Amino acid sequence: MIATEQSGIAWVVLNRPDKRNAMSPTLNDEMVEVLDAVAVDDRSQVLVLTGAGNSFTAGMDLKEYFREVDALPPVQQEIRRRTAHLWQGPRLRGFPKPTIAMVNGYCFGGGFTPLVSCDIAVAAGDAMFGLSEVNWGIIPGGNVPQAIVHTMSLRDALYYGMTGETFDGRKAAEMRLVTEAVPAGRLRERVIEIAELLKAKNPTVVRGTKEAVRHIRSMGWTEAEDYINTKLAAAVNTDPEQGRARGLTQFLDEKSIKPGLQAYSRPAGESEGHGR
Ligand code: ACO
Ligand code: V55
C-alpha cells in the first residue's frame, strides 16, 4: 500500500480502488510491512489510514481472502490469513503513534476492525457502513464482534450485525462508532486539523494515554490502578523532554501557563518530531 509522509503525517492508503480496497492476503502482507516502517519513521508523528477512490474498504476480499484460500490445506489457510489479523489487530491497535481513520466511502465487514483499531475515526457524512457478513452467509469473524461491542451499544451491534442494514457516516457518529462525521468536502481538512492537535503534544504521554485507555478495559479497578500508576511512573522516567517537570515549572514558578487552558511550551524541535 502507499505510505506517504507529509509534514509529520503518514498517509497510509488502502490502494485497490478497482476492488473498492477489499483486503486480500497480498494487501494484508503489505500492511504489516508498511505499519512497521511507519512506526519507526521519525518523519511522522501521526498515522492516517484511508482508502483510494470512493471506498475506505469493502472488507475482506471474498475471492482472494476466502474462496482462493479455502482451496489450500488447513495450516496454509491459517498462515495465508494471519497477516489480516496481525495488521488490523495488534499492529494497528498498539501502534506507537496516534492513528486516525479517515472514512471516505464504503466500510464493510472486516473493515470495522481497522476502523476501531484507529484511535480516532472521522467519516464523511455520506460514507456507507455495513456489517454485511450476514448478507453472504457468515458470522462476523476476525475481531469484528469485539470491535463493534467496544464502540457501538449492544442494541446497535445486534441490530446492524443481525440485519446487515447499511448506515451512513452521520449515523455512525451518532452511534459513536466514529468520533465525528463531516461533509465529504471537509473530510481531509478536518483530519489534518486533528492530526495537528496530536502532533503538538508530547508523544510519550500521548502513547501512554492511548495504551492505558485501551488496556484497562479488561481490568478490574484494583489492577487498573496499579497498572496505571506503574505506567505513569515509567512514562515520567523515560520522557526525553521531561514534560511533567516543565509543566509544573511553567505553572507553579513561572506562571506562564494555565494547564487547564493551554499546554506547557515544549523544548525547541520537539514538536517537529525529533523526540523518540
Ligand atoms: N471482495 C472481493 N471483491 C470485491 C469486494 C470484496 N469484498 N468488494 C468489491 N469487490 C470487487 C467487485 O467484485 C468488482 O470486481 P470486478 O470489477 O473485477 O468485477 C469491483 O470490486 C467493483 O465492485 P462493484 O460491486 O462493481 O462496485 P460498486 O461500487 O457497485 O459496489 C460495494 C461497491 C457496495 C462495496 C460492492 O462491491 C459490495 O457489496 N462489495 C462487497 C462488500 C462486502 O460485503 N464485503 C465483505 C464484508 S464481510 C468481511 O469482510 C468478512
Ligand atoms: C472476517 C474477518 C476475518 C476473518 C473472517 O467478518 C471474517 C470478517 C480479518 O479476518 O478471518
Image: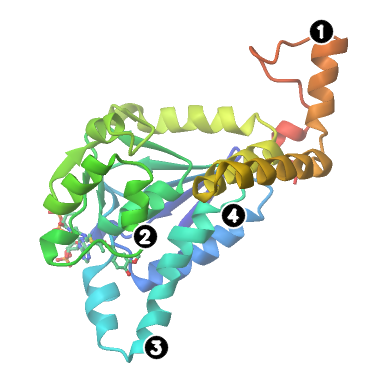
- Quadrant where the image shows the N terminus: bottom left
Question: From mark 3 to mark 2, how far is it between C-alphas?
Answer: 20 Å
Read off the residue under disc 1.
Answer: 255
Q: Secondary structure at mark 3?
A: helix
Read off the residue under disc 2.
Answer: 143
Q: Position of residue 81 (x, y in %)?
A: 38, 75
Read off the residue under disc 3.
Answer: 75
The disc, 1 or 3, on the residue closer to the chain's N-terminal end is 3
Left or right: where 178 falls relative to 105: right
Q: Secondary structure at mark 4?
A: helix
Mark 4 touching mark 2, by CB under 8 A? no
The disc, 4 or 1, on the residue closer to the chain's N-terminal end is 4
Q: Position of residue 240 (x, y in %)?
A: 82, 40
Give the farthest residue toward the bottom: 73
- Viewer-side label of 4, 1: 1
Question: From mark 4 to mark 1, how far is it between C-alphas?
Answer: 38 Å
The disc, 2 or 1, on the residue closer to the chain's N-terminal end is 2
Mark 3 touching mark 4, by CB under 8 A? no
The disc, 3 or 2, on the residue closer to the chain's N-terminal end is 3
Q: Secondary structure at mark 2?
A: loop
Read off the residue under disc 4.
Answer: 38
Nearest the viewer among 252 and 122 is 252
Left or right: where 26 falls relative to 246: left
Mark 2 touching mark 1, by CB under 8 A? no
Q: Quadrant of residue 170?
A: top left
Report the residue at 31% width, 41% height from top. Answer: 152
